[in-house]
Image (cartoon, helix red, strand yellow):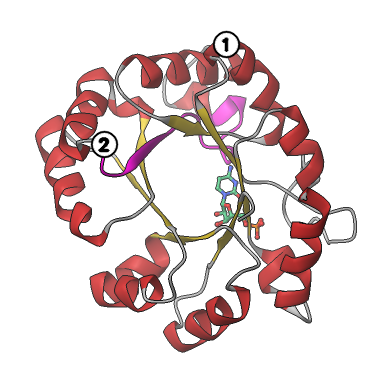
Amino acid sequence: MNQVFCAIDTPHLPDALALIEELRGKVGGIKLGLEFFLAHGAAGYCAVAEKGLPIFLDLKLHDIPNTVAGAVKSLLPLQPAFITVHASGGAAMMRAAADAAQKKTKLLAVTVLTSLDKTDLSAVGQEANTQTQVVRLARLAKENGMDGVICSPEEISALRTALGKDFILMVPGIRPAWADANDQKRTLTPRQAIGAGASYLVIGRPITKAEDPAQAAQRIAAELA
Ligand code: C5P
């Protein structure tokens, strides 16, 4: 199976299930986020899981260590392949999440949200250069039991160098040469991203908004093969 997790960014359950059915065998897994999970909860999650693809549950947990550990424990029965937590929640929070996960799911840390620019970061008291901050948080994540991080295409090389070959880099912001960029600004193609050191790719609209999603997914799979 390929390294692509298709982002299902719709709150509409029947649409999501029909799309996932079409994508079976053509993508490596499905990414569900807050919008889907808060609308449909565990029942919606289980309906997707029945399709048989690994699920990346992107809930970006961020709270005190005890609460995040409890949240991870509550999610374990769903058997997600990946869960996300915010690295800025700190070492103890990530350690508590890792202990709670008992290696039954992989934990990925979110470093600096790519929606934040230098001015936004400065406004919340974070003056470090963004790339420096991303690498710092990724190191902290690795030291505290995280299996990997989410990163943008332009951070792949620096993180691969800083964190070694086994640390998981899950990368959104991917655009095949034939797809629209939409609102993504600094993209790589699937092949370029894997070539640069990405472990997995998150791809949404180039598949979900394609005239023929199954064909788009198949084309990406062929480019990666
Ligand atoms: O449609 P598209 O391929 O842009 O979707 C990418 C997915 O990855 C979306 O779910 C989006 O929220 C997520 N994402 C992103 N950029 C980040 C972090 C997450 O596009 N920096």
- The amino acid sitting under disc 2 is Lys
Res. 162 mark: 1
Res. 103 mark: 2
Residue at 50% x, 79% y is 16
- The front one of 95 and 165 is 165
Q: In this view, does 54 lie above or below 201?
A: below
The picture places residue 118, in percent across and down from the top left corner, at 60, 25
Residue at 34% x, 14% y is 143
Residue at 44% x, 19% y is 137
Residue 106 lies in the magenta-colored region: yes
- The front one of 112 and 76 is 76
Taking the image as shown, residue 184 lies to the left or right of residue 113, namely right
The picture places residue 86, in percent across and down from the top left corner, at 36, 34
Q: Is residue 170 above or below residue 8?
A: above
Q: How far apart are marks 1 and 2 (CA)?
A: 23 Å
Magenta stretch: give its range.
103-120
The picture places residue 24, in percent across and down from the top left corner, at 57, 73
Res. 191 mark: none
